[in-house]
Amino acid sequence: MVSKRIQKALLGNSAIRAMFVEGKEMAAKYGAENVYDFSLGNPATPAPEAFHAAVRDLLDTADANGAAGSLALHGYMENAGYKEVRQAIADNLNRRFGTKFDAHNLIMTVGAAGGINIIFKTILDPGDEVIAFAPFFGEYRQYAANFDAGLVTVQPDLHTFQPDLADLEAKITAKTKALIVNTPNNPTGVIYKPETMQSIGAILEKKQKEYGTDIYLISDEPYRELVYDGNHEDFLTKYYKNTIVGYSFSKSLSLPGERIGYVVVPDEAADAGELIRGIEISNRTLGFVNAPSLVQQAVARCLEEKTDVSFYDENRKMLYEGLTKLGFTCIKPEGAFYLWVKSPMEDEEAFVNEGKKFHLLMVKGGAFGCPGYVRLAYCVSHETIERSLPAFAKLAESCGLTAGK
């Protein structure tokens, strides 16, 4: 029999992944061109040719050096990753954001998910609490539960989907060990502006003094480069010294299946030396051991590369404008590649099921800790967006919506 922990996890299994699997089944039944799958944040833009070229060159060089080359390319390294890779990333961050990192501040990780889990293992004790701003990536709850910690939800302003900072201040207790921030946000696409981050930093500083504890701000940044409408990439360590950054190349280089990212621990963070060593140990003891060796070295050669943001921007405008014209209420995304849509039906699951009648796959807002809405991942082809709009028109009509209102 499986463990009680896994029995509980099975009950809360990812609605996103379940919808993705259902989409595959529907595509096989009706034809992929007749199914409009907006469930999974799987990038639609290809990985840069520079990444492919880097992989080929690394493999060719290893082959030329025989067994020694193969061992060097595919072998173990420090749990934190190759020092030269970490230094290259540190130099890139310093140049872009005015930081002062060195290789020792970085740990290469198995994606952002691996990064968050090794951070949590390092800082959390049973009974501790992690705060998240709703709506949030649903796996945060499971990641905290992995270490017998609880997730506390801060409600958003339902007009802007910016965090309710008064609610944040009220939710922080002596048990609070971390606040996790995801901007640009999955699932809403909103960006937390500098003034918001300054206010968050001030609240955390105040609460640290009140309780005599360290509270870490964990910045989950897989969408950092995907910003629109004149918004700029931001790096949150400047707003609060106890900030730990988790990053993934999944979206910025379209490499989700390669599972590659990093964690940054600034020297200014409380107990930075122990944090770094603890995260390195957690990387090993959770079974990751180290981030993939070949991909580490390949991404280090592609730090100036960027996904085609204009591709997603075109999808964003097409879907947002198309749905609002049909009468749907949507939050206009400022970043990432998700559209957050208010359910016109009181029961959001009924709305999701209604969409399936027209082969539209949407993820319920309850999966993100915010019922009453659905998420659409518009990281799909332009053609999928175009073909889906007549289906959304039928869905709008079935829900009694009036076009243009």
Image: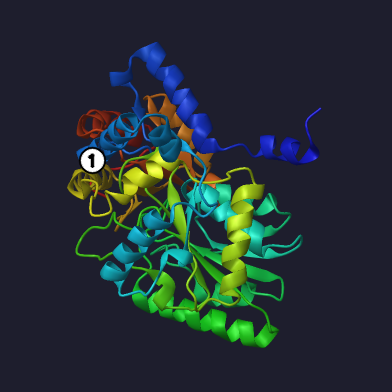
Percent coordinates x, y for residue 316 in the rendering:
25, 47
Percent coordinates x, y for residue 379 in the rendering:
31, 39
Q: Quadrant of the N terminus?
A: top right
Q: Give amino acid for label 1.
A: Pro
Q: Nearer the viewer, residue 35 or 344?
A: 35
Q: Nearer the viewer, residue 280 or 343?
A: 280
Answer above or below: position of 211 versus 221.
below
- In the picture provided, is 174 more to the left or to the right than 51? right
Answer above or below: position of 106 versus 261.
below
Q: Secondary structure at mark 1?
A: loop
Percent coordinates x, y for residue 250 in the rendering:
38, 44
Residue at x 28%, y 31% (from the top left corner): 60
Q: Is residue 337 visible?
A: no
Figure quadrant of residue 96: bottom left
Answer above or below: position of 298 versus 216.
above
Percent coordinates x, y for residue 288 in the rendering:
58, 44
Check disc 1 and report the residue beneath it.
48
Figure quadrant of residue 67: top left
Q: Nearer the viewer, residue 193 or 94?
A: 94
Residue at x 46%, y 29% (from the top left corner): 20
Q: Residues within 10 Å of mark 1 (few under 14, many from 20)?
A: some
